[in-house]
Image: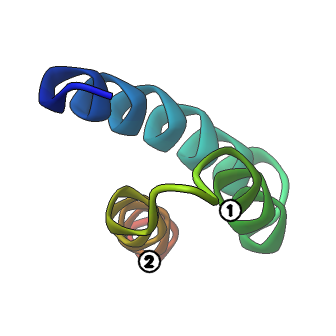
């Protein structure tokens, strides 16, 4: 996966996961992100942080 692709994946997964966290639960959003990004732990950590920040900013 090229570097720009990783950023695109992060943006998409992060946006959708934050939406899940806001409309459902943070746990569901975390599970979704972990399923999609299981092979990319760097991006997973960034997305999990995005989810946490979005939930705190509700």
| Label 1: element kind | helix
- In contact (CB < 8 Å): disc 2 and disc 1: no
Q: CA distance from mark 2 to mark 1?
A: 20 Å
Assess disc 2: are there few (<14), some (14-19) or many (≥20) residues with their C-alpha within 10 Å of its C-alpha: few
| Label 2: element kind | helix
The quarter of the displayed image where residue 20 is located = top right
Q: Position of residue 40 (x, y in %)?
A: 46, 57
Residue for badge 2: 56
Q: Position of residue 45 (x, y in %)?
A: 39, 72
Answer with left or right where residue 48 lies relative to residue 7: right
The quarter of the displayed image where residue 2 is located = top left
N-terminal of the two: label 2 or label 1?
1
Name the residue nearer the viewer: 49 or 56: 49
Compared with residue 23, is residue 57 higher up or lower down, i.e. above or below?
A: below
Task: Single out the residue that lies furthest toward the left.
Answer: 3
Question: Which residue corresponds to the image point at 47% horizontal and 34% vertical from the top-left?
Answer: 15
The N terminus: image quadrant = top left
Q: Position of residue 9 (x, y in %)?
A: 41, 29
Compared with residue 21, is residue 30 higher up or lower down, i.e. above or below?
A: below
Question: Which residue corresponds to the image point at 29% horizontal and 34% vertical from the top-left?
Answer: 6
Q: Position of residue 27 (x, y in %)?
A: 79, 73
Please tell me the numbered disc located at residue 34. Answer: 1
Answer with left or right where residue 27 lies relative to residue 34: right
Answer with left or right where residue 31 lies relative to residue 47: right
Question: Which residue corresponds to the image point at 77% horizontal and 46% vertical from the top-left?
Answer: 23
Compared with residue 17, is residue 12 higher up or lower down, i.e. above or below?
A: above
Name the residue nearer the viewer: 43 or 57: 43
Assess disc 1: are there few (<14), some (14-19) or many (≥20) residues with their C-alpha within 10 Å of its C-alpha: some
Task: Single out the residue that lies furthest toward the front.
Answer: 1
């Amino acid at each position: 996966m090229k570097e720009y692709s990783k950023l695109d994946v992060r943006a998409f997964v992060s946006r959708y996961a934050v939406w899940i966290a806001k409309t459902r639960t943070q746990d569901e959003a975390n599970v979704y992100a972990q399923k999609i990004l299981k092979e990319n732990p760097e991006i997973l950590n960034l997305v999990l942080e995005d989810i946490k920040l979005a939930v705190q900013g509700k």
